[in-house]
Image: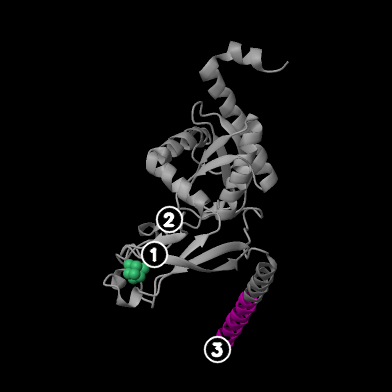
Amino acid sequence: MVRIDRQEEGEARAEKVAHLARRYGRIRQEIARLKAMDEALADAPDGQISLTDPDARAMATSARHSGMVGYNVQSVVDTETHIIVTHEVTNQGFDRDQLSPMSIAAKDALGRNDLHAIADKGYFSGPEILACHEAGITTTVPRPATSGNAAKGMYLKADFTYDAGRDVYVCPAGEDLTYRYTTEERGVQLRRYWINACQTCPLQSKCTTGTERRITRWEHEQLVDDMGNRLGRDPDAMTLRRCTVEHPFGTIKAWMGHTHFLTRRLKNVRSEMALNVLAYNIKRMVALIGIRRLMQVIPG
Ligand code: SF4
């Protein structure tokens, strides 16, 4: 009996050792896999790797920390007909660089000499607005509030009025902030304005925590001022944008069952989206002019 017990004890120990050896091997494999992934991540130009679809990327969405990984579908939609004039699929997680490529593509597709592009604040970019202007495209894009001054109840740049004739900013105290010097940041020329009277100003606590309030003006800021004026004259512009662009997106998303793309890789997702857009535009045109007229105008 004693011999049998010892034998069983020895077998159990051997089994335990074998089990631990297997676990140790799996842990070593996992460490090697994670190390390889860490190296691949370090080599990835944008610091991202998607294990589901190598081309998909993290998207900046309005929902913070949403962790949305996928593709960025851009579209330009005609406000009158709701036809998708042009579209693109990218794996760039933000819209900031898309205003001029999409607007110029839409202008080319329509064969127009002029175009008014309305976009949301995610598209606000000085160089992009300038590129549109140079291409003969009027843009209306709200400027995002990046300063924390509003939350602190302090004066915003909008509280300073630019006087183009005198090239000064008139501050809330009615003083002139004069031009001082120009700097270049990331290829953009920025003009700086200030006044030396801030330290004795009764409004200083609402204006600046420094010795003086400085205002920066982009060399082409007139374009931004013009956009602000357009938005002031037409406060419904952003509602028009939302209603226009969400009609086709909502329709296509409903067709897709509010789920993800069926294909993977950027090339395939582009094809999938192009088919969706084509189907949407055909159905839209049938609704607008009827199938008989549509068949007449499609080149044979
Ligand atoms: S602190 Fe300076 S810039 Fe601000 S309101 Fe007073 S004088 Fe004008």
Q: How is the image coloured?
A: one colour
Q: Secondary structure at mark 1?
A: strand
Q: On the image, numbered disc 1 is attached to which residue?
A: 176
Relative to 107, does residue 214 appear above or below in the rendering? below
Residue at 66%, 74% (x, y): give it. Answer: 35
Mark 1 nearby-residue class (10 Å; few <14, some 14–19, many ≥20): many
**Residue 11 colored magenta?**
yes
Given this view, does label 3 or label 1 mark the residue nearer the observer? 1
Q: Which residue position holds label 3?
A: 2
Extreme-front residue of the structure:
166
Q: Which residue is mark 2?
A: 163
Q: Residue at x 38, y 38 (%)?
A: 236
Quarter of the image for residue 30 reads: bottom right
Q: Which range is magenta? A: 1-24
x, y (%) of residue 158?
Answer: 38, 57
Q: Earlier in the sequence, mark 2 or mark 1?
A: 2
Query: Quadrant where the C terminus lies?
Result: top right
Circles 3 and 2: CB distance less than 8 Å?
Answer: no
In what element is the residue under mark 2?
Answer: strand
- Is 158 part of what is drawn in magenta? no
Q: How far is mark 3 from mark 2, CA to CA?
A: 104 Å
Residue 75 pos. (x, y %): 57, 39
Q: Earlier in the sequence, mark 3 or mark 1?
A: 3
Q: Is residue 199 visible?
A: yes
Q: Is residue 299 left or right of residue 212?
A: right
Looking at the rendered structure, the kind of residue marked 3 is Val
Residue 121 x/y as whole percent: 47, 50
**Residue in the image at 43% along x and 55% along y:** 163
